Image (spheres, grey):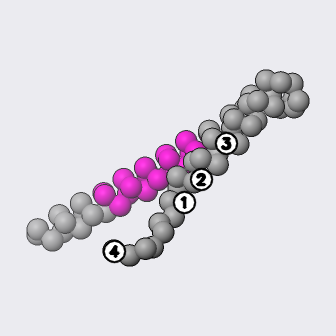
Amino acid sequence: MENKKETNWFGRFIGAMLLAFAVMLVLKCTGVVGWSWFWVASPLLFVGLMLFLLFVLYLIVVANDMCESDDDKR
């Protein structure tokens, strides 16, 4: 077996966004910052947007693969 360390960049990205949300939430609830709730929730919205874009990309790849396999049958 190789001793190669895998880097899970997407998991680290989601973890960083959740940490940013938690920090912003604490700052908002304690009154340290006067940001709107939209900006406090923006890290979660960004993660949701990224997941949505990855899902759309997945659908495009699957649809393209299905079209190519239909062309091979003809």
Q: Quadrant of residue 38?
A: top right
- Cα gap from disc 4 to disc 3, whole angstroms: 34 Å
Query: In the rendered image, which residue does mark 2 sit on?
Result: 13
In terms of secondary structure, where does tag 4 sit? loop
In terms of secondary structure, where does tag 2 sit? helix
> Label 4 is placed on what type of residue?
Met
> Label 3 is placed on what type of residue?
Leu
Q: Are marks 4 and 3 in contact (CB under 8 Å)?
A: no
Percent across and percent down for residue 66 are 24, 60
> Label 2 is placed on what type of residue?
Phe
Query: In the rendered image, which residue does mark 4 sit on?
Result: 1
Q: Nearer the viewer, mark 2 or mark 4?
A: 4
> Label 1 is placed on what type of residue?
Trp
Q: Nearer the viewer, mark 1 or mark 4?
A: 4
- Relative to 53, is 8 above or below? below
Q: Residue furthest left?
A: 74
* 53 horizontally vs 18: left or right: left
Image disc number at residue 9: 1
Q: How many marks?
A: 4
Image disc number at residue 19: 3
* 17 horizontally vs 7: left or right: right
Mark 1 or 4, nearer chain start: 4
- Examine the structure image and report whether residue 46 is included in the region drawn in magenta: yes
Mark 2 or 3, nearer chain start: 2
The residue positioned 54% from the left and 60% from the top of the image is 9
- Cα gap from disc 1 to disc 2, whole angstroms: 6 Å
Q: Are marks 1 and 2 in contact (CB under 8 Å)?
A: yes
Badge 4 crowding class, 10 Å Cα cut-off, few under 14, some 14 to 19, many 20 or more, is few
In terms of secondary structure, where does tag 3 sit? helix
